[in-house]
Each structure stands twice: as structure tokens, then as C-alpha cells.
Amino acid sequence: MQVLALALRRLASSLPTLLIILVGLFLLLQLAPGDTVDALVAQMGGGDPAMIAQLREFYGLDASVAVQLGNYLWRLVRLDLGYSAIYAKPVVDVILERLPATLLLMVSALSFAFAAGIALGVIAARRVNQWPDTMISTLGLIFYATPSFWFGLMSVVVFSVHLAWLPAGGFETIGAGLTGWARVLDAMRYLVLPTLTLGLGFLAIYLRIMRASMLEVLTLDFVRTARAKGLAEYGVVVRHVLRNALLPMVTLIGLQAGTMLGGSVVVESVFALPGLGRLAYESVVQRDLNTLLGIVFVSALLVIVINFLVDIAYARLDPRIGSGR
């Protein structure tokens, strides 16, 4: 119960942050030239001033900024994200259509980066200043320094164009009519290259943090005590060192959740994934402010939920957090 109470307090403290983000973005978007009606008129090839005035009145864009902000916040209280003029449907429906692709990409990339980072970090720490440590650290530096879009483009050239092993883009085979596990396996093939592209940069960070954390914990007194009591080296690493070394890694997941959402914009654009990142880019280009604000709202909620789960996991790994000591 103490762990849950701590997590709920952290969750409640995130709500003012969410409000500040939404209000700040709304006001910043008002400073940008043009609006949704301008984008609609451009798509239609022009329109007379009377029609443009009617459209602005219909979408509530003829009111002052304060009134528009108040109407938007009141809709949020009722969980109404508004209507997308560009897609001609409620913003909730537009986001729900794109959300699964982004969630799958984030979960797969985070799982890959976290698991591989732990494994490589442990190997590097156990073979410190030896050739495995040097090779892993060098690869980590290369992954961290290389832009994700370059990884994506090169992976398409190598694995899709030359080797023809994996699809170059998309989310699933269109028109295949697959169901059940066949559809899952088909979607997994399409997610391999985006997952590697998005995950390699985070993998480099995780392995370096894990290596440094392992080296620090290995020098502590309780590790020497465990070895002096005759515990096998595998037991020392798994039962004593690894659990304590994981604490910075768990914290890093919460901090980088927003960064991963931002990185998905580039990856989804490279691989033509129908996710929130690509939708955000399209919304900016088409001046679909309601959809863009809805994406920010959903993305902020995702980051808050991830940090909520991280707080619970952190308190479980370190009992001192949950007990309040």
C-alpha cells in the first residue's frame, strides 16, 4: 500500500505539468501563421471570403484566443478532443487508428534496448578493460553517435533492397487477409527494422549506464561479504549485484519515454508506419490543430503512465523508496 500511495502522489503531481504543457502548446500554435481553415481552403483550391468566415465560425476560430483556450480546456474535462477538419472525423477516432502502431513500436524498441543493454552492460562490466569491454563500448559509442534516420535508410538499402529479407515499410501486408497468429507474425516482420532503428540509440545509453552501475555495485561491501561467505559468482551477480545495478536503468526508462515518442516521428516517417509520430507530422503540415493537440495530450498521458509504472517498479526494487525512508 505504501508503494501504491507513493505512485499515486507522483501521478497527482504530474497533472499540473500536463496542464502547463497543453496550455503552452495551444498558445504557441496561435503564434504560427495560418489555421485549419486556411489549410482546408488551400486543399479546395481557394474560396470566397463569406465561405471562409462561415468555416471559421463553424470551427470556433473566429473567437478570441482566451475563449478558444477556455473551450478547449472544457472539452478536455469532458474527455472530448474535438473534431478533425482535415480527416473529417473526431480526433479520438483518428488517434485510436494510429495508436496501436506507435505502442507496438515503442514496446518492441524499449524491450530490445533494455534487454540487450542489460546483457551487454553486464558482459562489459565482468570483462572490464578486456577485449569484450572495448568492443561493446566502441559499438555503443557508434550507435549513440549515428543518427537514427541514417540507420533506418541503410537498413532499408541492405535488408530490403539488396537482401530482400524484410519489408521496406508499412505495418502489415495490405490485402493479404491474414488473421490470428499469421497476422501477428506478418506485423512482426514489418516491425523488425523500425525496432532496430529506434532501439539502437537507446541500447547504447542503457549498456553504458548498466556497465557503470555494475562496476560501482561490484565494489560495495555487501558484495565482498557475499563472496566471503562462499556464494557462487553467478549467485553474487544475479541475486546481489544485478538487482541494485538495475535501479538507474529503471529510472532511465521513465526519463526517456518522451524521447522515444519524439524519435518515433523520424522512424515512422522513414518506414511509412501509420503511427502517432507520422500523424503529428501530417497535422503540422496540414495545420490540423485539434489533432496535434490531441496527439500531445495522449503522448503526455502515455509518459505519465510509464513514469507511474516506473515508480512502482523502482519502489519494488528498492524497499527504502516504498517505506519512505
Image (cartoon, grey):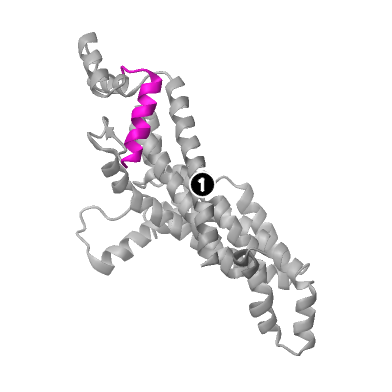
Q: Residue furthest bottom?
A: 230
Kind of element beneath mark 1: helix
Q: Nearer the viewer, residue 284 or 23?
A: 23
Can the viewer see residue 310? no
Residue occupying image coordinates x 27% and y 31%: 86
Classify 82 as above or below 307.
above
**Residue 115 placement, left or right of 240:** left
- Location of residue 77 in the rendering, given as x and y in whole percent from the top left corner: 35, 39
Whether residue 80 is visible:
yes
User: What secondary structure is the stretch in magenta mostly built from?
Assistant: helix
Q: Nearer the viewer, residue 10 or 274?
A: 10
Describe residue 228's horizontal placement relative to residue 117 as left or right: right
Tell me if mark 1 has few (under 14), some (14-19) or many (20+) residues whose alpha carbon lies within 10 angstroms of its own: some
Identify the residue at horizontal 43%, vertical 47% (top origin). Answer: 301
Q: Is residue 176 above or below residue 283?
A: below
Q: Quadrant of the C terminus?
A: bottom right
- Indicate the position of residue 110 as horizontal and vertical percent values: 50, 58
Q: Seen in the image, is 316 located left or right of residue 233?
A: left
Is 277 rendered above or below residue 9? Answer: above
According to the picture, the residue beneath numbered tag 1 turns out to be 14
Please name the residue shown 24% across and 17% down the image: 45
76 in magenta: yes
The quadrant where residue 180 appears:
bottom left
Q: Who is closer to the viewer here, 36 or 305? A: 305
Task: Tell me the amino acid under the disc marked 1.
Answer: Ser
| Span shown in magenta | 62-79
Viewer-side residue, 316 vs 70: 70
The image position of residue 19, as x and y in percent, is 46, 38
**Location of residue 289 in the rendering, given as x and y in whole percent from the top left corner:** 36, 30
